Image: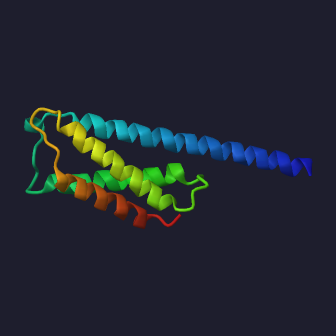
Amino acid sequence: MIIFHLIYFKLESKMMESQKIWWLVTFTYMIIIFFLSSIPGKNIPLIFPFSDKIIHLVEYMILSLLLKKALSSSSFKYVSILAVLIGVIYGVSDEFHQSFVHGRKCDPGDLIFDTIGCILGQFLIKK
């Protein structure tokens, strides 16, 4: 019996380490989003019309995936909903932050694509 407890403790400890790594990756990614949002508007090239919307969608789809992985050991039953909610709240704060950056503005269209990206991210992974 003691052997089973030791094995369980070892596995649980490794799972906790894995979650810490996922949170570290997630927070690092959020910091990268923040710094990219700090680039003045005139320094951002538009690849094609509405390319910024696609970038927002992909950016927040990745964030949503990372959040789900980081939250996966949570006891909360609806991890996907929580991941989307956190992603959207971060998107709102990001748009607010951009309103203070020269040449940028708070764009509701960007927030819509952030939200769509967060939702799509949850459909890409089942667990």
In the depicted structure, whether residue 49 falls above or below residue 16 = below
Q: Residue furthest right?
A: 1
The residue drawn where x is 65% and y is 47% is 15
Question: Of residues 72 and 75, which is closer to you in this image?
Answer: 75
In the depicted structure, whether residue 63 falls above or below residue 21 = below
Q: Picture quarter containing residue 109?
A: bottom left
The residue drawn where x is 62% and y is 41% is 17
Residue 39 in percent (x, y) is at 18, 34
The residue drawn where x is 13% and y is 42% is 105
Residue 123 in percent (x, y) is at 41, 67
Residue 121 in percent (x, y) is at 38, 60
Residue 25 in percent (x, y) is at 45, 41
The residue drawn where x is 28% and y is 54% is 114
Q: Is residue 64 visible?
A: yes
Question: Of residues 118 and 75, which is closer to you in this image?
Answer: 75
Question: Of residues 105 and 123, which is closer to you in this image?
Answer: 105
Coloured how?
rainbow
Q: How many marks?
A: 0
Q: Is residue 63 visible?
A: no
Q: Picture quarter containing residue 41?
A: top left
Left or right relative to 95: residue 42: left
